[in-house]
Image (spheres, rainbow, N blue to C red):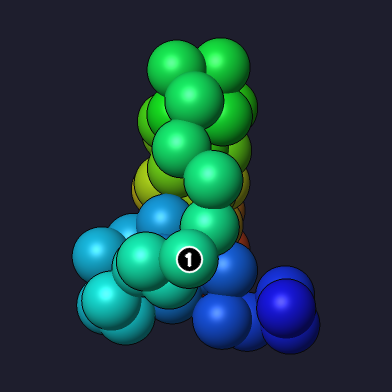
Amino acid sequence: MGVWLQIAEYLYTKKKDPNRPHTKWVGYMHEINRLSILLFLAALIIIMIKLLRH
């Protein structure tokens, strides 16, 4: 699976593959990845705002 499709699934913009195995550990991993992507995007927005104000 492509990286962009996986990110789209993490951010709930693409429907998940029903044939993928589901375990609680994979679910935990996906939640941590989703959180890290959102924090990264928030940090980018903050950096851009600081750069534009300066």
Quadrant of the image occupied by residue 26: top right
Q: Residue at x 28, y 76 (%)?
A: 15
Q: Residue at x 54, y 45 (%)?
A: 21
Task: Say if residue 35 shows up in the picture.
Answer: yes
Q: Is residue 51 left or right of residue 45?
A: right
Identity of the amino acid at label 1? Asn
Quadrant of the image occupied by residue 12: bottom left
Q: Residue at the far right: name it.
A: 2
Q: Is residue 53 above or below residue 24?
A: below
Indicate the secondary structure of the residue bearing disc 1.
Answer: loop
Q: Is residue 11 above or below residue 27?
A: below
Q: Is residue 43 left or right of residue 4?
A: left
Q: Residue at x 45, y 17 (%)?
A: 24
Q: Which quarter of the image is occupied by the N terminus?
A: bottom right
Q: Position of residue 36 (x, y in %)?
A: 55, 36
Of 53 and 21, the residue lying toward us: 21
Of 5 and 18, the residue lying toward us: 18
Task: Say if residue 36 shows up in the picture.
Answer: no
Q: Residues within 10 Å of mark 1 (few under 14, many from 20)?
A: few
Q: Residue at x 46, y 37 (%)?
A: 22
| Residue that carries the numbered disc 1 in the rendered image | 19
Of 52 and 30, the residue lying toward us: 30
